Amino acid sequence: MISAMPNAGLAIELQPAERAQLEQWESAQGTPQQVALRCRIILRAVAGQQNVAIAAGLGVSRPTVQLWRKRVHEQGIGEVWEIAPGRGRKAHYDQGQRDRIIQATLQSKPKGMTHWSCRLMAEAQGVSKNTVNRLWQLHNIKPHLSRTFKLSRDAKFLEKLTDVVGLYMNPPDKALVLCVDEKSQIQALERTQPGLPLKKGQCGTMMYDYNGNGTTTLFAALNVLDG
């Protein structure tokens, strides 16, 4: 919510998540200096400082402070990453292009893959990897993350859980624990039930159970005596 304040420029009020995002951009090592400066301008504006005080404290002109108050007012905090056409190396993408990138991320998958990467999405949309990364950060989209879940209906689940956890809590002398699974690079695509799709601020989910391949061979490899 943003409202006008006489003689003090635009008074800016941000949601906690938006303020945290600006603070993250401002302090991140990879953030360009000009973007970090814009973040500082907006953060000071949010704190209630007047344009004159912000300009003096950051060593910029008052029109610069007014400009970025106005741009964030009209376009949101993601505008701090944008550069006017003809200046700098970054291209200026309109809202339609941004919407297409977000829609493609949430509603499609690259051929033969489980999710989009910055590189693949950049190639598909004809933009830079940094542009995709900034949009994903702005909308809190994390295609590479997924949350697994397992609901057991076993009547003896608690009893079995206690036995397994008990071994870890109080292991016998000279015990050796082997935990074996498929390599993370090998995608197990045959889940027993479908998960929930990727959304803004929420990673996709998938069932813990899947139809595995090569399990017999994997366990046979541990049988060192008879192969």
Image (cartoon, rainbow, N blue to C red):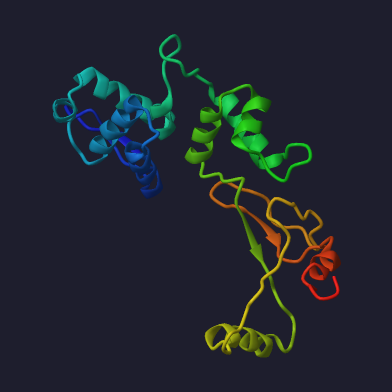
Taking the image as shown, residue 145 lies to the left or right of residue 137, namely right
Q: In the rendered view of the protein, which quadrant contains the C terminus?
A: bottom right
In the image, residue 199 above or below residue 125: below
In the image, residue 198 above or below residue 110: below
Given residues 51 and 173, the one toward you in this image is: 173
Given residues 116 and 212, the one toward you in this image is: 212
Residue at the extreme front of the image, as rendered: 225
For image coordinates 38% across by 32% down, the residue present is 31
Q: In the rendered view of the protein, which quadrant contains the N terminus?
A: top left
Given residues 54 and 7, the one toward you in this image is: 54
For image coordinates 58% across by 88% down, the residue present is 166
Residue 18 picture quarter: top left
What is the number of callouts on the image?
0
Residue 2 picture quarter: top left
Taking the image as shown, residue 125 lies to the left or right of residue 211, namely left
Taking the image as shown, residue 127 lies to the left or right of residue 26, namely right
Taking the image as shown, residue 84 lies to the left or right of residue 120, namely left
Residue at the extreme top of the image, as rendered: 86
Residue 49 in the image: x percent, y percent? Answer: 18, 35
In the image, residue 108 above or below residue 191: above
For image coordinates 52% across by 35% down, the residue present is 133
For image coordinates 18% across by 30% down, the residue present is 54
Residue 80 in the image: x percent, y percent? Answer: 38, 28
Residue 69 in the image: x percent, y percent? Answer: 30, 28
Residue 224 in the image: x percent, y percent? Answer: 79, 72
